[in-house]
Image: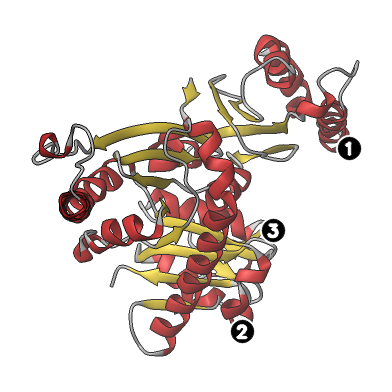
Amino acid sequence: MTTDAKDLVDGTGLRSIAMLTDPVGVLSVYTTADPREGSTMRPAWQVRIANEFAALDRRLRKDDDTSLADLLAVRLADVDRELRALVDAATAGQGRALFLALDAGTITTVAVQVPLGDHVELGRSAYVRPLLAALSAYPPAGVVAVSGHGVHLVDVRLGHAVDAGSDSYEPVDTGRRDLTGPAAANPAAAQHSAAQHDLYARREADRLARFLRGAGGWVAGRAVELGWEYLVVTGDPERTAAFVAGLPHDRALPTVTVGHRVAGLPAAKVYPLIAAELADLRHRCARDVARRARDLALGGGAGAYGLADTLTALAEGAVLNLVLDASAEWAGRVGPDGRLYPELVAVPGVADEALAVEPRLGERMVEAALRQGGRVTLLDPADAVHLRDAGGVAAVLRW
């Protein structure tokens, strides 16, 4: 099964991957093709993946029981074609991933246009942090190119940009026929003609401004349909101001206005021009999410701040948005019922020996949030300043 990039963005594909479990184990393989190495005999990223597989095999064969290593070798032979495609320089997508359930033998693959790193992991469930990191760094966003011809939309997600529709403006010809013909010999008539031209230009500018303000509702609707989290409006300042004034306040998206004139450019060329502004907007919003979670929690509202509070909220199914410092790692324990606990914390009613060590608590928190229909935001360390006193973890809650 191949997961489409759109499904990753809207949550359905990512949630299905997060729910991949297997009684024997799920193999998660990520690789990032470097187009600069496409002409080399064996690119460095292919070598890294081979080394990752070799290291996993050594770990599995350390113990006397090598049955899992043997089963993995058999399964890898079964999916040799898919693995070859994963590391083939000619395969589409810069970032690729493959998830293999060892007992069931089922395969899920992903291809996106952004880096996913190089990882080979074997665990009881799929390893999703690299996908989350990519989604956090390259969220779905809309670009609105505003011009005298109307508005043109570009959809940007996971580093890929495509045209998303246009709303065209047709100038009104009223009065223009009166202004044709040779110039008048009478200077007074010429002045009158110039005044008519000015009047027409002002009326036409007013009509265009009304059109652009009215286009705001249509764009807001498209933003909902496409799941945009941010909006970049670009074009002539006077025209972009008219458009922004028409955006509905009840469906407001984080929006930035820039002065690039991109009308007529294909989507692939629009995105690089606004990428820096979009990244700045994303960082600003990421800091706002962390601050909101902190303020809600400390103010007695629907927020959790710190590992213990967040794990409690996850156990209650209350997490709407899990917010994590991407550079942080946590260790903890898991109870017989699957509930997660901080490390070295006594659990009333549960014997200490019944609590299993969980060295990858962050991954388990991510899985729990996604399975409950929540969202996960991974913050760059520089954006996680509001989480420093919380150990890098907080959440916005449903209640």
Q: Specify few, some or many for label 3: CA neighbours under 10 Å numbering under 14, 14-19, or 20 or more.
A: some
Which mark's residue is nearer the viewer, 3 or 2?
2
Q: Label 3 to label 1, Cα distance in Å?
A: 19 Å
Q: Residue at x 66, y 13 (%)?
A: 79
Q: Label 3 to label 2, Cα distance in Å?
A: 22 Å
Report whether residue 117 is seen: yes
Q: Residue at x 17, y 55 (%)?
A: 188
Q: Residue at x 46, y 38 (%)?
A: 8
Secondary structure under the numbered disc 3 in the rendered image: loop
Where does residue 330 sit, x and y in percent of width and height?
66, 66
Q: Is residue 226 left or right of residue 327?
A: left
Secondary structure under the numbered disc 1 in the rendered image: loop
Res 149 → quadrant: top left
Disc 1 marks a residue whose amino acid type is Lys
Which mark's residue is nearer the viewer, 3 or 1?
3
Residue 17, placed above or below residue 189:
above
Q: Residue furthest front?
A: 185
Disc 2 marks a residue whose amino acid type is Asp
Residue assigned mark 3: 359
- Residue 62's disc is 1
Camera-nearest residue between 252 and 66: 252
Residue assigned mark 2: 389
